[in-house]
Image (cartoon, helix red, strand yellow):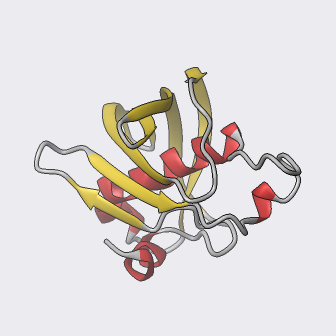
Amino acid sequence: MNKEEIKKLLPHREPMLLVDEVVLNDDGTATGFYHVRGDEFFLQGHFPDNPIVPGVIQCEMMAQSACILFADKMNEPGVLPLYTGLDKVRFRGMIKPSDTIRIDVELKRSSHPLYLLHGEVSVDGRKCMGGDFSFALTKAE
């Protein structure tokens, strides 16, 4: 799923659309990718002369990468995915401009409209972040 196809599922738009591609894997997991160009808004002040992708942005990338797992539900009119929690999130490595981020997510539990997932973020096989997250599929008002 390329960026234009992702836009058909997610309400996010630039500059908050933070995945370039998402793939549904044969085992039911999803893998997202994002190439850090270096001109992103979140790098402008984080940090001058040493830009690093903020942890909160990595968490958002993880959630957006999960979109393909819920394509059938997200295609319904007015559906809005909202974060409901983060748990056991750990940051283990810096992500810098020119890095290509790989985001792997898997569904752990679901009780519609609530979903619990686990995700891991890596660059070149080096784990940079991992943790559990939950969100709800709600109706936009």
Q: Is residue 119 visible?
A: no
- Nearer the observer, 72 or 124: 124
When the figure is inspected, residue 97 is found, relative to residue 129, above or below; the finding is below
Left or right placement of residue 119 versus residue 85 in this view: left
Front in this rendered view, residue 15 or 7: 15
Asked where in the image residue 13 lies, by quadrant, the reply is: bottom right
Q: Residue at x 35, y 37 (%)?
A: 125
126 shown above or below 18? above
Residue 48 horizontal side relative to residue 12, left or right: right
Residue 90, horizontal then vertical, whole percent: 58, 21
Residue lying furthest bottom in this view? Answer: 4
Q: Give me the residue at 52% from left, 53% from top.
A: 99
Q: Is residue 12 above or below residue 123?
A: below
Of 122 and 103, the residue lying toward us: 122
Q: Position of residue 18 (x, y in %)?
A: 57, 62
Of the 4 image quadrants, the one containing the N terminus is bottom left
Q: Position of residue 47 (x, y in %)?
A: 84, 46
Point 29% across, 49% down: residue: 30
Q: Quadrant of residue 87?
A: top right
Q: Is residue 106 visible?
A: yes
Marker count (numbered): 0
